């Protein structure tokens, strides 16, 4: 059974492979997305190691001079997606967006290196990639944490990767939508509009893009100039973990300066994460840097922080919290607590379950000794695939497939989970 699933997953990935990068899925997302690529590389690493490295090399080839790695690289023109390069106008030789996404590349590189059979080849590739990933992390702490708190803010909901989460509702209230140029959405022609964000939310998204464009995408200015500045525990947890992984890889390469800088960033980030602990909910929650308030929205962002080697007591509490969510839905881990009023089982990031998030939470919990919950999350993930195929995301109550189909990173996670289970067995 598991080999048949791996074969199907591989077919999905190969179908979305454009040679040096993969698209998340045909139609809805026709370009290269940042964290999709890094996580998809993990899937490739089990059947084509060279292709896995290429995925991340292509992404990093489009890094900006200041270190930022964009959230989308528009390799080929495709008018099936909005907002395309003509809206972003970032002036890059190959057009990109002007915002970023969760920093999973460092986390993925560590796994690629550890799995590589030919360490000499892996070292050579790593020698080129590691300084770039480190520069991206330095950019984060420089331009998205100007007060040096150890926590970075996102300035657009799409940076979080959890684009439409309830976590951003309060922050978006501060975004004016007057004067947004009229536009036609394309996402709702590819996917069920009930699974997608509302038109009002889309206006805020585009207002922010136009605002940053008006500031010439000058990163040092954008943080303070943004009416939307949210500190996401999942986003920061991923960054912290990737700094750790970069530090370990730098040790392997004998690059002492990257090793010590990256380790210092990780230590500071992990300590600062504690300020996002929400005792009433028993999980981390987002902090609104504009209002100075720790939010109460019970989303998966606070559980995703488990990937950051959080203190054991925190990992234990997060596992408990996920156990509670399991009593409220059939398929872990819902992106929003089903008991909360804002929960919507099919609208993306406001309830549905995503395999990439499951994978990262389980990976972190297992490292922190919460193996039972990690296994339960894996089992739920595989049930979803068997029931509903390689969808973009799933209804956590019914297990129905939602959003796009034949999804690259979902397939990659299936391979990753099944291969790792084999190793563990
Ligand atoms: C959606 C998701 C985002 C992902 C992209 C491509 O926008 O919210 O996380 O990177 O699709 O799959």
Image (tube, rainbow, N blue to C red):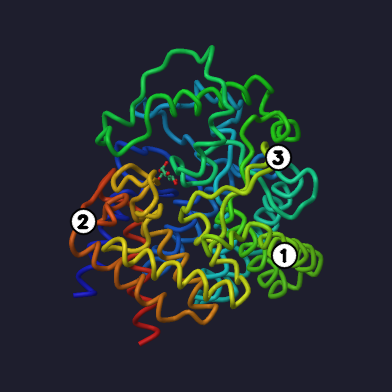
Could you say whether the residue bearing mark 3 is in a helix, strand or loop?
A: loop
| Residue 409 in view of the camera | no
Q: Residues within 10 Å of mark 2 (few under 14, many from 20)?
A: few
**Side of 17 where 159 appears, left or right:** right
Residue 260, position as x, y percentages in the image? 79, 68
Which residue is nearer to you in this view: 117 or 36?
A: 36
**Image coords of residue 59 (percent x, y):** 53, 48
Label 1: which residue? 271
Left/right of residue 190 with respect to residue 163 in the rendered view: left
Q: In the depicted view, which residue is nearer to us: 8 or 417?
A: 417
Q: Which residue is mark 2?
A: 398
What's the distance in space between the residues labelled 3 and 2, CA to CA? Answer: 46 Å
Badge 1: residue crowd in 10 Å (few <14, some 14–19, many ≥20):
some
Q: Residue reaching furthest front?
A: 280
Secondary structure under tag 2 reads loop
Residue at position x 21%, y 56% in the image:
398
Residue 65 numbered tag? 3
Q: Which is nearer the N-term, disc 2 or disc 1?
A: 1
Residue drawn at the location 55% of the way across and 46% of the way down: 101
From mark 3 to mark 1, how far is it between C-alphas? 29 Å
Q: Position of residue 376 (x, y in %)?
A: 34, 75
Residue drawn at (61%, 26%) of the image: 91
Helix, strand or loop status at disc 1 = helix
């Amino acid at each position: 059974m598991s080999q048949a699933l791996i074969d199907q997953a591989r077919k999905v990935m190969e179908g979305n492979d454009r040679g040096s990068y993969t698209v998340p899925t045909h139609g809805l997302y026709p370009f290269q997305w940042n964290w999709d690529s890094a996580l998809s590389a993990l899937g490739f690493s089990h059947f084509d190691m060279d292709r896995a490295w290429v995925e991340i090399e292509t992404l990093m080839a489009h890094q900006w001079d200041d270190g930022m790695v964009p959230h989308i690289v528009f390799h080929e023109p495709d008018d099936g997606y909005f907002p395309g390069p003509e809206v972003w106008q970032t002036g890059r030789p190959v057009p990109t967006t002007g915002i970023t996404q969760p920093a999973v590349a460092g986390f993925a590189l560590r796994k690629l290196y550890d799995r590589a059979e030919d360490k000499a080849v892996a070292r050579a590739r790593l020698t080129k990639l590691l300084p770039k990933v480190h520069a991206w992390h330095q950019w984060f702490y420089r331009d998205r944490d100007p007060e040096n708190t150890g926590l970075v803010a996102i300035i657009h909901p799409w940076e979080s990767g959890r684009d439409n989460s309830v976590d951003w509702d309060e922050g978006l209230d501060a975004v004016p939508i007057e004067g947004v140029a009229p536009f036609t959405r394309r996402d709702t022609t590819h996917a069920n509009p009930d699974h997608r964000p509302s038109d009002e939310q889309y206006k805020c998204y585009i207002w922010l893009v136009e605002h940053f464009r008006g500031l010439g995408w000058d990163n040092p200015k954008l943080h303070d100039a943004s009416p939307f500045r949210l500190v996401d525990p999942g986003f920061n947890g991923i960054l912290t973990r990737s700094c750790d992984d970069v530090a370990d890889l730098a040790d392997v390469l004998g690059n002492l300066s990257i090793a010590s800088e990256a380790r210092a960033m990780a230590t500071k980030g992990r300590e600062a994460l504690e300020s996002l602990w929400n005792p009433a909910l028993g999980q981390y929650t987002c902090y609104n840097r504009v209002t100075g308030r720790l939010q109460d929205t019970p989303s998966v962002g606070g559980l995703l922080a488990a990937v950051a080697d959080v203190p054991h007591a925190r990992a234990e509490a997060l596992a408990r919290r996920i156990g509670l969510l399991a009593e409220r839905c059939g398929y872990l881990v819902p992106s929003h607590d089903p008991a909360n009023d804002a929960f919507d089982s099919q609208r993306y990031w406001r309830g549905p379950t995503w395999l990439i998030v499951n994978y990262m939470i389980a990976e972190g919990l297992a490292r922190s000794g919460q193996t039972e919950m990690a296994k339960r999350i894996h089992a739920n993930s595989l049930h979803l695939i068997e029931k509903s195929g390689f969808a973009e995301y799933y209804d956590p109550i019914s297990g129905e497939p939602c959003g796009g189909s034949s999804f690259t990173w979902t397939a990659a996670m299936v391979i990753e989970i099944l291969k790792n289970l084999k190793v563990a067995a």
